[in-house]
Image (cartoon, grey):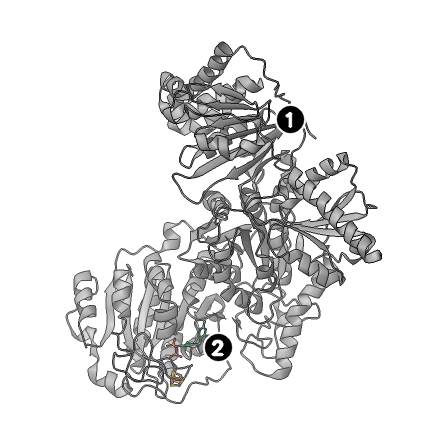
Amino acid sequence: MPDDLNWAIGGEAGDGIDSTGKIFAQALSRAGRHVFTSKDFASRIRGGYTASKIRTSVDRVESVVDRLDILIALTERTVHENEDELHEDSVVIYDGERSTMQDVEVPHGATALEVPLKRLAEDAGGAIMLNVVALGAACEVTNFPIENLDESLQKRFGDKGEAIVENNKQAARKGQEYVREEYDHEFPYDVETTDEDYVLLNGDEAIGMGAIAAGCRFYAGYPITPATDVMEYLTGRIDQFGGKVVQAEDELSAINMALGAARAGARSMTATSGPGIDLMTETFGLVATSETPLVICDVMRSGPSTGMPTKQEQGDLNMTLYGGHGEIPRFVVAPTTISECFWKTIEAFNLAEKYQTPVFLVSDLAMAVTEQTFSPDTFDMDEVEIDRGKVVDENDIDAWLDEKGRFQAHFPAADGVSPRAFPGTTDGAHMTTGLEHDELGRRTEDTEVRVEQVDKRNRKVETAKEQEEFDYREFGDPEADTLVISWGSNEGAMREGMEFLDQEGIDVRFISVPYIFPRPDLTEEVQAAETTIVVECNATGQFADVIEHDVLQRVERINKYTGVRFDADELAAEVKATIADATSTQEVQAE
Amino acid sequence: MSSDIRFTDFKSDKQPTWCPGCGDFGTMNGMMKALAETGNDPDNTFIVAGIGCSGKIGTYMHSYALHGVHGRALPVGIGVKMANPDLEVMVSGGDGDGYSIGAGHFIHACRRNVDMSYVVMDNRIYGLTKGQASPTSREDFETATTPDGPNQPPVNPKALALASGATFIAQTFSSNSQRHAEIVQEAIEHDGFGFVNVYSPCVTFNDVDTYDYFRDTIEDLDETDHDRHDREQAKDKILEGDKEYMGVLYQDENSVPFEEREGVEGSMAEIPDGAPEGAMDLVREFY
Ligand SMILES: Cc1ncc(C[n+]2csc(CCOP(=O)(O)OP(=O)(O)O)c2C)c(N)n1
Ligand code: SF4
């Protein structure tokens, strides 16, 4: 267990919860501490309980735990919502002068730290800064040098003018002084700083940054939680690199615009979440049959239908794997960490262009809204490699013209990948269509050509399996009896969960799989284990199903579909219970 | 781009399977003429087509082309043009494709004003699915799926376009090939979204909106004192009940294409072998 601190601020949506969390997270990160944030928010702009949580340590942190050390409670409800996570060393900071906070009872012997947040904020220049007063108080409680806050206050309020920045610095100091003077209490916290430099970013931002690094120049999208941050990140930034973001009228339009741009030769992408993926599915088949390279990002949220838009789920695996009428060759890549969001986005563009195929880039809400610290060289741009596949130009196009001089854009090449000529290329003019077509792109119902083209398109997947490594990441003891498999953002919780399991003397081998299709064959790994458990945030176990299908053997499942991500201790407990259950069944069967 | 381009260079070697006499033949010939006249050639032209008899046009023409899914041709065209403004982009399809399933995209393409042309072959029927009512069918037009007529007034695409902020609205009749080609040429030359509704009769399923009907009814705006730059006049003409017009109904002289307003310059197809220069600054932003 890293020597970590768990901090949270909670209140109503509209209380500035998010930005307060961000200011503190940045201050911690700038002070050389690792940070892992999580959010709990309702699907409304004002009102409704909202919280921003930060876990921080000098060691890396990969997940949330169900423990809170410092809680800033802007509403009484905040205390109730977090009751179970408080302990006797917890400190709850709240404004005891507020009428609604008079009867707050702080449970489990935690310290109730009443600070007149509003009054002190007014003294510093305005009630609006009460959250910053609370941050100052938290600095004092945790022994965290308050100077570290200054820069993030500058970052947050700089464009509102120096006076505002100064007022906020004052507000923080008022909170600090109040605690220092009114409570001569020894708090058991001492938040160390280090000289490390970290960057702090979330999964959506990492995807956006990966897209620009990969040379993406065109993005069309329609806003939807939790994918909008990808679009917001790219807006303005992509322009500096010669690109453009277009907000389309709907997802049908977004994917079609992205398709058009891709056919014009741009690296092109769209991002959405479940409901938008449904709409895009119509064009998904066209992308594949027209052999257009396109990255379609699905940041999953809880479904079906509009489901729980601000809640975590990993329920779209089947949709991305099987969605669309007819049979559609595709790649499905699912990053398992925020840094992988960056690198897998780059890989998605390369796969799309090398194989002229749509690529689903699948992320999830927990990853999208989580910010995590990384050493900047995690995103070393010199490491980025671009492979555009078989693009032909004026000089080599002759090899791909038929006897009448027509460009064979759908030539049934042995590896399944045809030449590609960007519009504007002399002699490259050609047609393509979602109808079945021949090598020239002309509609056909000829039985032989049909089979030839279907085989050709499917062959890309075979070629990719030979040329690429659709691998997995592995942690823990490779000889352990228990094998845990997961996909998506559960990796962090499981990795930390392994430390809890270790304390209980339970060894596991953990495999985290970033490729849904094609995916690594785990037959040997599953066969070597006594118990295999597949962990995912959905009710039916969609990844467990494909593993069972691949290895022809039953696996155990841990499914969470409350809308909340796994936390490390919870997952560890579930793994332990599942092993116990499975072992007793195995014993019964053996008798 | 060579200067000796002829319109037949835009013909593919695929023979059209349209019914003999179908209005779409004339529509297509005019499009090819207009493209050649405006100095384009197949290698710099991108044609996007919808679904329907009309949508087959991309197959019979020779250029870079995409025949997409039903109703979504316009956004594809927008994507192509945004990614490479040097290309000549022409989008085409039927009245069902454009004003029914694709109506939402139509409205937004009008207001977005990307510099491309949109030619709709309006036969007031669904041809390819064998004769159902389309959004431009008359209220009492009987078909297998609407035995008593659609019982709702037809969509007025020109009005929809005007209300949506279109900067070029025209109408032609495929049988008047000379005028049709000229007007499509004007749509291509217009700086922005050049919308042309073409009366393109379906000889197989529509026995009301026939060649004879249009020939007898149509009024050529060139023979009136219509001022195409006057939005009020355009509105009055467009909303006039039973009249059928040929010519440019409206053109905004001050139209600036969307991609120009957005500062898109040149093709987005060229990218470096690795991350672009200055990419590390993106990481530093997160300090
Ligand atoms: C999503 C979808 N729905 C329905 C169809 C069937 N369909 C093909 S063409 C067509 C109507 C085309 O009518 P129109 O655009 O007027 O073209 P026309 O054939 O008259 O030229 C329909 C409904 C389809 N291809 N795709
Ligand atoms: S059915 Fe009508 S629209 Fe279709 S090809 Fe025949 S005449 Fe033309």
- Residue B188 horizontal/vertical position (percent): 35, 66
- Residue B21 horizontal/vertical position (percent): 36, 88
Tell me whether the residue at label 2 lies in contact with that at label 1, contact meaning CB atoms closer than 8 angstroms: no
**Mark identifier at residue A168:** none
Judge left or right: residue A543 versus residue B22. Answer: right
Closer to the observer: label 2 or label 1?
Answer: 1
Secondary structure under the numbered disc 2 in the rendered image: helix
Q: Which residue is mark 1?
A: A196
Structural crowding at the residue carrying mark 1, measured as other residues with C-alpha within 10 Å and reported as few (<14), some (14–19) or many (≥20): few
Judge left or right: residue A355 versus residue B148. Answer: right
Question: Does the image show residue B242?
Answer: yes
The vertical placement of B50 against B112, above or below, is below
Q: Which residue is mark 2?
A: B59
| Along the viewing direction, whichever of A8 and A359 lies nearer the viewer | A8
Residue flagged by tag 1: what amino acid is it? Answer: Glu
The vertical placement of A67 against A270, above or below, is above
Secondary structure under the numbered disc 1 in the rendered image: loop
CA gap, disc 2 and disc 1: 61 Å
Residue that sits furthest to the left in the current view: B225
- Disc 2: which chain? B
The vertical placement of B133 against A91, above or below, is below
Say which quarter of the image contains residue B258. Answer: bottom left
* Image region (quadrant) for ligand 1: bottom left
Say which quarter of the image contains residue A315. Answer: bottom right
- Disc 1: which chain? A
Question: Does the image show residue B230?
Answer: no
